[in-house]
């Protein structure tokens, strides 16, 4: 392991994420478990320095990350954040818990034939959607396929490339795993296209059915010879599945079926998966899809969890997806084609227009933004904070980063300052001398104070008390001087995320830690750090909810893989639980987590697979409204009055009534040729008077003036 890998350890910061531990290493980089500012665990792949320093590699890496962001869905986890500029290249995805196909077959033997049929269908659908966006995986193999309770996940696109572009490796480099490579990958790497993935699929299905690959040998060279010149090992038995595998393993790329043809064979032939554990259940026909849509309200209202189709969980490493999502997007063809509510009636027509007050160019790629009455403050890759005049969009000032990474924690207009946390990528636990907290003056952009402290992930202000949460606990400081007043941090991972609600400080502490398994929510005295009350939560996996109610705190409870929300809880400032609702994920939910925002009696879910927003009642689950969205649209954002905002892929901002889905207003499109901001999410903020500030491109900020300023966000 090189010096860089040794330096990047627990407590290091990469982007907005704090490293927890190393998961593994590969040819292109290393994979770490990291924690987001909201407490969600992600898998982060950091590219090796020798590749990151190559300008050609950097350009192609940026292109491929951008392609990855275009898709999401059922059989992989989408890229949720990435850095394609600067000295450190990385991308973050979510955990995918479960053994690989290699682990499963190695520990328990080959799969039953009916399970291989289902696997064939699901992997063919995965390849179809990967190829649709112009990507070729080039390393599909049993160890890159994870088996979860929701079906397989294709992972590790470390050597994937955009079809028709230059590859990332040297001209003489061999890319792939010989036992599952196509003949053309040995003969002409540059000519290996989507058909090479189909050949690999044939090998994977052979392995799943027999426990061995179709070509074996004493060395990679011997295997390569067999792949190019010999026929695959004969399969035991005969039948349509065996015939399909043989076609996938044809020597000539043109002789292999396409993924779409494989799906058609699986639907129409005798190898169609059985209904009890089949692709018909997971991937219904158009006729069945229409029937399910008509029954949605009744199904969503029923109690209980979504049934599992297949559980294949056993011993094996916890692997992570470094790959693309797979979603067939619905196109938003104008308001007349909006989704229908539970009653089947079409939604209301387009609302009044909102004006685009101004646009401004940012110095580099944008991160989180927030606004005061006077300023819009944004994080960028070059500057810790960049300030713009909220009325005109004119740049006021910018303060450069003093470390590799920075996070804007909290803003106090009353004291005219913004608190920023900064840290370097190579910090190990306890290396606080290279991590700092800064108080930046809102008028000038100059530092008022700068102190050494653990890299903060969130903070709140209560009078003169600054409460800062980090991956190692929580602490208090005097906001005027930066002096520490109390400390509840440790040398081990014990993340804490404080939040201000109705004048009180509440802290969320996910688990597990060295002292407890479950998460807790606590009321904190901001002046002393004393715990006023503490409530155990039902799972270690929790995060703050996005809700309209500002007099309570909402908590999202997640499953073990942090892929599906299972419960929504609401506590007041005395620790009394005011609400608790079980959450059923969308029936076709993929591995990328659904985004949910909560109103007083309803929630709005982004169903990424079916490409829609769905508004439902919290108590009974009844569908109130639906709205088509594309994979390139931003996640929904909710304000204090229950208004839901969606930034469309054409840079039109739409404001909806979250309770019934009515369009309240929409803006004109903002003209920009830039791709959307990195990292998913909403990238917008709503001021109290209803004015919206949003990053409409990677380096473009826009202000939207609603038709009626009096009806602001509050």
Image (tube, grey):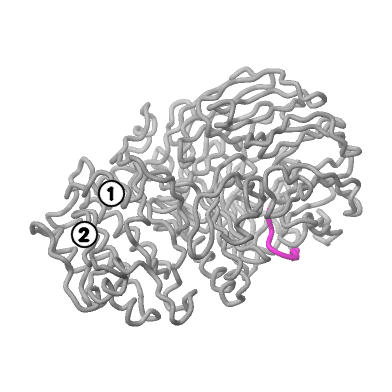
Q: Is residue 174 above or below residue 453?
A: below
Seen from the viewer's position, the closer of residues 123 and 44 is 44
For label 2, the SS is helix
Q: Which residues are magenta?
A: 360-367
The image quadrant that residue 192 belongs to is bottom left
Residue 581 percent location from the top left of the image: 49, 26
Residue 476 percent location from the top left of the image: 80, 32
Which part of the image, by quadrant, shows the C terminus? top right
Q: Look at the image and say whether residue 362 sits in the magenta stretch.
A: yes
Residue appearing at x 55%, y 69% in the figure: 61
Task: Check residue 106 in the rendering and tell me which mark sits there, or answer none.
Answer: 1
For label 1, the SS is helix
Q: Is residue 363 above or below residue 407?
A: below
Question: Dot 1: within a 10 Å radius of its alpha carbon, few (fewer than 14), some, or many (20 or more) residues?
Answer: few
Asked whether residue 338 appears in the rendered view, the answer is no
Q: Is residue 630 above or below residue 111?
A: below
Q: Are marks 2 and 1 in contact (CB under 8 Å)?
A: no
Asked whether residue 158 appears in the rendered view, the answer is yes
Q: Nearer the viewer, mark 2 or mark 1?
A: 1
Residue 156 percent location from the top left of the image: 44, 59
Relative placement, left or right, of 116 versus 60 is left
Which part of the image, by quadrant, shows the N terminus? bottom right
Q: Look at the image and say whether residue 102 sits in the magenta stretch.
A: no
Name which of mark 2 and mark 1 comes first in the sequence.
1
Residue appearing at x 42%, y 68% in the figure: 135
Q: Which residue is mark 2?
A: 206
């Amino acid at each position: 392991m090189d010096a860089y890998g040794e330096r990047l350890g627990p407590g290091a910061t990469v982007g907005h994420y704090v490293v927890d531990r190393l998961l593994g290493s590969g040819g292109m980089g290393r994979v770490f478990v990291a924690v987001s500012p909201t407490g969600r665990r992600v898998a982060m792949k950091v590219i090796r320095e020798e590749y990151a320093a190559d300008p050609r590699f950097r350009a192609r890496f940026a292109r491929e990350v951008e392609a990855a962001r275009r898709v999401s869905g059922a059989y992989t986890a989408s890229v949720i954040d990435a850095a394609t500029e600067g000295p450190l290249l990385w991308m973050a995805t979510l955990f995918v818990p479960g053994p690989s196909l290699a682990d499963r077959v190695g520990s328990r033997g080959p799969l039953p034939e009916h399970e291989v049929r289902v696997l064939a269908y699901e992997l063919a659908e995965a390849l179809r959607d990967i190829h649709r966006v112009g990507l070729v995986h080039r390393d599909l193999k049993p160890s890159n396929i994870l088996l979860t309770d929701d079906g397989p996940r294709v992972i590790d696109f470390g050597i994937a490339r955009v079809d028709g572009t230059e590859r990332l490796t040297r001209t003489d480099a061999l890319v792939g795993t010989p036992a599952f490579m196509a003949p053309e990958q040995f003969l002409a790497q540059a000519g290996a296209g989507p058909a090479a993935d189909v050949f690999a699929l044939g090998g994977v299905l052979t392995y799943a059915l027999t426990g061995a690959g179709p070509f074996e040998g004493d060395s990679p060279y011997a295997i390569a010879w067999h792949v190019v010149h010999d026929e695959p090992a004969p399969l035991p038995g005969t039948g349509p599945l065996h015939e399909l595998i043989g076609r996938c393993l044809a020597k000539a790329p043109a002789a292999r079926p396409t993924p779409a043809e494989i799906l058609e064979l699986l639907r129409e032939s005798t190898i169609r998966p059985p209904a009890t554990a089949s692709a018909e259940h997971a991937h219904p026909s158009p006729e069945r899809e229409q029937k399910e849509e008509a029954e949605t309200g009744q199904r969503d209202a029923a109690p209980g969890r979504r049934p599992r189709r297949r559980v294949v969980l056993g011993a094996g490493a916890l692997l992570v997806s470094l790959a693309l999502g797979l979603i067939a997007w619905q196109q938003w063809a104008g308001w007349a084609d909006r989704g229908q509510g539970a009653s089947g009636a079409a939604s209301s027509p387009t609302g009044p227009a909102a004006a685009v007050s101004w646009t401004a160019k940012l110095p580099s790629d944008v991160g989180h933004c927030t606004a005061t009455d006077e300023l819009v403050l944004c994080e960028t890759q070059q500057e810790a904070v960049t300030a713009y005049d909220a009325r005109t969009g004119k740049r006021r000032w910018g303060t450069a980063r003093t470390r590799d990474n920075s996070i804007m924690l909290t803003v106090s207009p009353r004291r005219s300052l913004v608190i920023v946390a900064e840290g370097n990528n190579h910090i190990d636990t306890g290396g606080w001398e290279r991590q700092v907290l800064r108080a930046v003056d809102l008028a000038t952009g100059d530092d008022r104070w700068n102190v050494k402290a653990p890299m903060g992930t969130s903070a709140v202000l209560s009078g003169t008390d600054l409460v800062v949460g980090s991956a190692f606990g929580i602490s208090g400081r005097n906001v005027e001087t930066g002096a520490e007043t109390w400390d509840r941090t440790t040398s081990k991972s014990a993340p804490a995320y404080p939040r201000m609600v109705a004048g009180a400080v509440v802290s969320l502490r996910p688990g597990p830690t060295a002292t407890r398994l479950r998460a807790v929510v606590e009321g904190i005295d901001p002046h002393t750090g004393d715990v006023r009350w503490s409530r155990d939560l039902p799972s270690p996996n929790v995060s703050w909810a996005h809700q309209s109610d500002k007099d309570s705190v909402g908590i999202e409870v997640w499953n073990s893989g942090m892929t599906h929300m299972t419960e929504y809880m609401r506590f007041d400032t005395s620790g009394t639980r005011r609400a608790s609702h079980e959450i059923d994920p969308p029936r076709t939910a993929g591995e990328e987590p659904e985004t949910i925002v909560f109103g007083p009696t309803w929630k709005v879910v982004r169903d990424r697979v079916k490409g829609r927003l769905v508004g439902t009642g919290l108590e009974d689950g009844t569908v109130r409204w639906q709205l088509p969205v594309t994979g390139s649209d931003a996640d929904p954002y909710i304000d204090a009055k229950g208004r839901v905002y969606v930034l469309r892929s054409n840079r039109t901002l739409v404001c909806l009534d979250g309770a019934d889905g009515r369009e309240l207003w929409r803006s004109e499109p903002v003209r920009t040729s830039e791709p959307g901001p990195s990292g998913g999410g909403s990238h917008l903020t709503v001021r109290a008077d209803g004015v919206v500030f949003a990053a409409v491109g990677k380096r473009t900020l826009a202000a939207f003036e609603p038709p009626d300023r009096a009806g602001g966000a509050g």
